[in-house]
Image: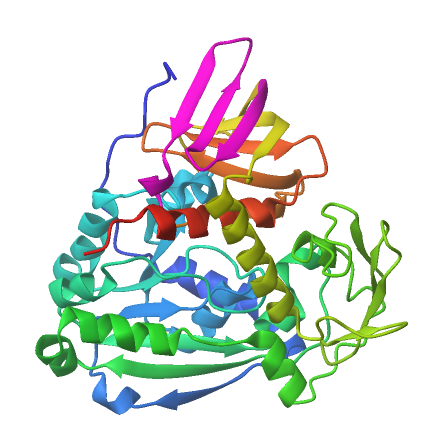
């Protein structure tokens, strides 16, 4: 905590040469996925600059953007951990660093600077995190007000196939799936000026409404890899038959509850089939939504509690993730508390601090992680026990809804 914090810097105009390098490096993956795209209303968008909003499915997203907009350069809203060890390079790419799910006025100033002063487009992933269940994650409130302030056309990029190729739960194992993107001028400059902030928010919500597993099923997209269910328990952590948590295992093509013995097979179209008896759920997002409702019930009746030993990493600058020791992470209806490092660390975070939670699987190949924090520091908590980080994310989202005062 005594280390100096990075000084606020205005984002730089992106170097065209670096964007060209990214474009070249993207070619193998885009070829492997037979990448295609369609444009809609782009003749109404003008020459730019734009605010580009893209859904977040997997690491190929940045490569897709390099194909869609090259040779034009654009700034990129990225997380501060992405700058660790390569801050100078990321700044030359035009990156605007921010901390996920932390209020950040400096981010708004950075976007304004690139668009209005440098006349450069900005790419942002408004969901902030990869989708767990293949459906859109909540968007931050107030985006409509930001659009009106920026006063530029808004372009959306929505992908199909990027999630099926590399879902977050599957341990970075790539599948053979074709990838497509729809590039749309969602709002022209006149639209941004004439529509209300609420109407702009509603338009964004409609644009970011999708279901990747339904897309795979309805379009008969085949994922035949024998590892397609590996790690599926990371999102489907609760058995709908016996109600037990933490004893599900996704391995190979099957999802098994080791408590009651119920077994599902994940078929080549992304649907679940019961090996014996009836299937409680066949569609993964339905199972995930059921878990969300169960978490909400626990919050309402006061029984929800996460209490686990963790290894703690801290991010306070752009030099390193500092592994500072062990601790105990607790999450209740009162929010998060983190204590550790032999009493030297004590942090509390209220439920209204953020509308969401940064939770991730196999983060930088270290392990599943829950990240909390503020502008002073981020705390990366790696559970030592079999803890479903997806449940913590659901609980944080639902708790925010319950605690948020109505307006």
Q: Which residue of the protein is positioned furthest toward the front in this rendering?
A: 301
Give the camera-side residue of 130 and 32. Answer: 130
At which x and y percent is residue 170? 71, 59
- Residue 83 figure quarter: top left
Residue 316 visible in the displayed image: no
Total labels drawn: 0
* Most common secondary structure along the magenta stretch: strand
- Residue shown at 51%/34% (left/top)? 331
- Residue shown at 29%/90% (left/top)? 41
- Residue 66 figure quarter: bottom left
Give the camera-side residue of 333 and 250. Answer: 333
Q: Which residue of the protein is positioned furthest toward the left in this rendering?
A: 194
Colour scheme in the image? rainbow
Give the camera-side residue of 30 and 235. Answer: 235
Q: Left or right: where does residue 238 sit relative to residue 123?
A: right
Q: Measured along the vertical axis of the image, is residue 280 above or below residue 336?
A: below
At which x and y percent is residue 151? 13, 69
Q: Left or right: where does residue 261 sit relative to residue 79?
A: right
Q: Left or right: where does residue 377 sit relative to residue 241?
A: left
At which x and y percent is residue 237? 69, 52
Query: Is residue 393 located in the magenta-colored stretch of the structure?
Result: no
Q: Measured along the vertical axis of the image, is residue 205 above or below residue 320?
A: below
Residue 395 visible in the displayed image: yes
Q: Measured along the vertical axis of the image, is residue 355 above or below residue 116?
A: above
Q: Left or right: where does residue 112 sit relative to residue 361?
A: left
- Residue shown at 32%/57% (left/top)? 140
| Placement of the N terminus among the 4 image quadrants | top left
Magenta segment boundaries in residue numbering: 325-354
Q: Measured along the vertical axis of the image, is residue 310 above or below residue 116?
A: above
- Residue shown at 50%/52% (left/top)? 296
């Amino acid at each position: 905590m005594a280390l100096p914090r990075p000084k606020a810097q205005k984002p730089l105009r992106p170097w065209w040469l670096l964007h060209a390098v990214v474009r070249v490096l993207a070619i193998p993956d885009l070829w492997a996925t037979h990448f295609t795209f369609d444009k809609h209303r782009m003749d109404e968008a003008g020459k730019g600059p734009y605010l580009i909003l893209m859904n977040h499915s997997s690491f190929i997203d940045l490569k897709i953007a390099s194909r869609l907009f090259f040779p034009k350069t654009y700034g990129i809203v990225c997380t501060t951990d992405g700058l660790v060890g390569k801050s100078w390079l990321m700044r030359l790419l035009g990156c605007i660093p921010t901390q996920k799910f932390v209020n950040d006025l400096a981010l708004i100033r950075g976007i304004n600077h690139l668009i209005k002063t440098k006349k450069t487009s900005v790419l942002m992933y408004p969901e902030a995190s990869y989708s767990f269940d293949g459906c859109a994650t909540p968007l931050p409130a107030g985006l409509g007000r930001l659009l009106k302030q920026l006063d530029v056309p808004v372009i959306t990029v929505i992908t199909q196939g990027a999630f099926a190729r590399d879902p977050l739960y599957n341990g970075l194992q790539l599948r053979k799936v074709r990838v497509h993107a729809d590039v749309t001028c969602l709002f022209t400059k006149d639209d941004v000026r004439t529509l209300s902030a609420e109407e702009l928010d509603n338009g964004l919500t409609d644009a970011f409404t999708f279901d990747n597993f339904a897309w795979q099923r309805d379009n008969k997209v085949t994922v035949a890899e024998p590892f397609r269910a590996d790690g599926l328990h990371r999102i489907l952590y609760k058995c709908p038959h016996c109600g037990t948590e933490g004893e599900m295992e996704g391995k190979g093509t099957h999802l098994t509850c080791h408590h009651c013995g119920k077994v599902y097979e994940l078929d080549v179209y992304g649907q679940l089939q019961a090996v014996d008896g009836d299937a409680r759920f066949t569609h993964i997002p339905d199972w995930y939504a059921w878990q969300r409702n169960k978490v909400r019930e626990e919050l309402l009746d006061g029984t929800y509690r996460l209490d686990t030993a963790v290894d703690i990493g801290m991010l306070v600058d752009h030099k390193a993730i500092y592994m500072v020791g062990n601790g105990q992470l607790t999450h209740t209806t009162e929010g998060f508390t983190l204590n550790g490092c032999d009493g030297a660390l004590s942090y509390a975070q209220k439920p209204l601090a953020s509308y969401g939670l940064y939770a991730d699987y196999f983060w930088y190949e270290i392990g599943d992680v829950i990240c909390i924090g503020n502008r002073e520091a981020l705390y990366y908590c790696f559970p030592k026990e079999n803890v479903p980080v997806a449940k913590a994310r659901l609980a944080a989202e639902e708790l925010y809804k319950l605690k948020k005062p109505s307006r």
